[in-house]
Amino acid sequence: MALRRLLAVHAHPDDESITMGGTLARYAAQGVAVTLVTATLGEEGEVIGPELQGLTACMSDQLGGYRYTELRTACAALGISDWRLLGGLGAFRDSGMIGTPSADHPRAFVRAAEGGPDHARAVAALVAVIDEIRPDVLLTYDADGGYGHPDHVTTHQVALAAAAGRVPRVLAVVRPRSVAVSALAAMPVPAAYLPAVPADLGYLAADGDVSVAVDITRFVEAQRLALAAHATQLELIEDGFALSNRIAQPGSDVEYFKLLTGQPMPAGPRADDVFAGLT
């Protein structure tokens, strides 16, 4: 069988580790050619802890460069050697949350959304990667970006536009609602952290929409090492992690995906392989 190729397209450093780190580590360990494309450096992110607060956009605006090094360490933990910034380092900037002034920055990635002035440029940059590596499967977000962040929504739109006619299958990372509810009910919340509700997790989907359930049991530790690399953005806790909002989120030994476009999964039980049925 020819070498399988997998492309993951994300908005910010840490998204790859939070949403599908175990899946990426599993396929990298199996010898699949895994490529990660990240759209921005996450310049508008908050910073956990007092030591590095001066890195933020409202201070020295050096967070993006720092998160670049965090991404490099996380990729090493996941076994990913081919990781890139969309269009090159600094081509696009973190837009921040909805309604923030950072969305007006001339390099804000939200300008690459459908109908935006930079959409064609972003799509062309991703098409160049696709034409180079020829992935069998592309992994990204669902249409709402998982939790509505403008850069995640834009990433979905750019990824679908670039993949059209070029990638045999495009999948979105999701959480089945029933799985999220069960995981939250079973999770012990450490003192000083807040309990989550399903809406806090994002990426929720109806159980019937899930096409693939990837067992990452053997790669949970690799994923946790990758998460730990993103120390400005999250803290590891028992059986999970917390972002700067200190809401405790559960980990998982399965990562889930739904079909967006391309060749359907084989009929029968839910697939456990993103490449299932591809010729």
Image: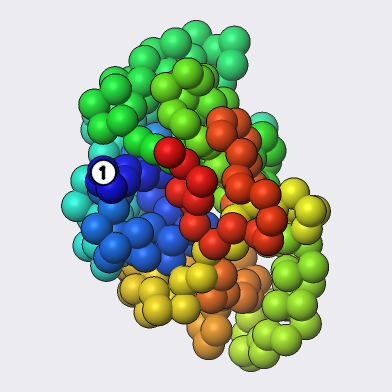
Q: Can you say whether 167 is above or below 40 in the image?
A: above
Residue 2 in view: yes
- The residue located at (67%, 90%) in the rendering is 188
- The residue located at (29%, 36%) in the rendering is 85
- The residue located at (62%, 89%) in the rendering is 190
Q: Which residue is mark 1?
A: 2
- The residue located at (79%, 72%) in the rendering is 181
Q: How is the image coloured?
A: rainbow
Query: Residue 43 is drawn in which quadrant?
Result: top left
For this view, does 71 lie left or right of residue 258? left
Percent of width and height locating residue 249: 62, 72
127 or 15, nearer to the observer: 127
Q: Amino acid at mark 1?
A: Ala
Percent of width and height locating residue 170: 53, 36
Figure quadrant of the C terminus: top left
Q: Can you say whether 232 is above or below 236 in the image?
A: above
For this view, does 165 lie left or right of residue 131? right
Residue 224 in view: no
Q: Can you say whether 186 is above or below 12 in the image?
A: below
For this view, does 113 lie left or right of residue 54? right
